Image: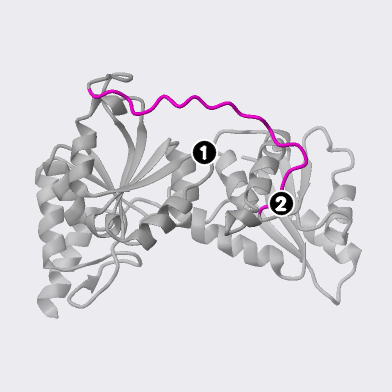
Amino acid sequence: MVGIILASHGEFANGILQSGAMIFGDQPDVKAVTLQPSEGPDDLKAKIEAAIATFENQDEVLFLVDLWGGTPFNQSNGIINGHEDKWAIVTGLNLPMLIEAYASRMSMTSAHEIATHICEVARDGVKTQPATLEPKKEKEEVVTKQTAGAIPEGTVLGDGHIKYVLARVDTRLLHGQVATTWTKTTQPNRIIVVSDSVAHDDLRKKMIEQAAPPGVKANVVPIDKMIQVAKDPRFGNTKAMLLFETPQDALRAIKGGVDIKELNIGSMAHSLGKVVVNKAIAMNQDDIKTLEELKEMGVTFDVRKVPADSKENMDNLLKKAKAELKNS
């Protein structure tokens, strides 16, 4: 695995390391190195060299640095002298860049390859809202789009069956961990939030659609509409990530014919009448009943917030919830 050095003036590197862990989970062979006001270039160089010495693979090292020409860059640039064939530096460190670097390590084994790849993602991560504030490019690319209109009903695309790369229960629906970590891991071409309440809330619906990561379209549909989509052969080329607010919504969709074999349980928020069973999940009697019914239907559970987490055992969590509710 490619080792990563995060280098910055002040505490920025430590902060972005923590932010990355919140979204992608704790990562091995990643070290934050900071230049403090009381320190000089030699102090920083010693820190960087000590950090690299902890990496399991010191042949491939990627330096993600805050600013071109600053001391963290200059010291990193001196250290890679003689290693240019394997090591690389990318400046302008931002959170999209870091998350993409983490994801890239899953499939890329070269620091050079990752460095080339993450630059475009880092640039695309700089956006404005409203979008009209985006600066105009000097040369606009001319793109010709063919408007085919709606695909005729009855058309069969692909094998006629929608593919579910992930089905997840998450009270927060589409947020950073989902839009980055899970999207990179499962590679959907469409994210579908399946919720009656959100589908009828124009503000929440708009916010979710705008939160979609680059290259992936997000839709919000009621549960009955998702049941129709699941049976429509026009979605045969769709690789979908389904997001449910509650296990009850997931159960209703599955009973209606949405062919989900495994359900990722990411978070179930605490509220009145629920008991906490781990850091992300709280349950009441209805949740227990729903999850047990899903289990009886043959649905398996993948209980974890991000792919890097270890999977938890749903039977143990249900047992704990029953005991807590009995004693409450």
Mark 2 neighbour class, 10 Å CA radius: few under 14, some 14 to 19, many 20 or more: few
Viewer-closest of 208 and 89: 208
Measured as percent of width and height from the top left, residue 267 is found at 32, 60
Mark 1 lies on residue: 215
Residue range of the region highlighted in magenta in the rendering = 134-153
The answer to which image quadrant residue 95 occupies is: bottom right
Viewer-closest of 151 and 223: 151
Q: Quadrant of the C terminus?
A: bottom left
Mark 1 neighbour class, 10 Å CA radius: few under 14, some 14 to 19, many 20 or more: few
Measured as percent of width and height from the top left, residue 323 is found at 14, 71
Measured as percent of width and height from the top left, residue 278 is found at 31, 66
- Eyeballing the image, is 122 above or below 189? below
Q: Give yes or no for residue 236 being in the magenta stretch.
A: no
Name the side, left or right, on which 5 lies relative to 161.
Answer: right
Measured as percent of width and height from the top left, residue 214 is found at 54, 43
Mark 2 lies on residue: 135
> Which amino acid is tagged 1?
Gly
Name the side, left or right, on which 44 lies relative to 60.
Answer: right
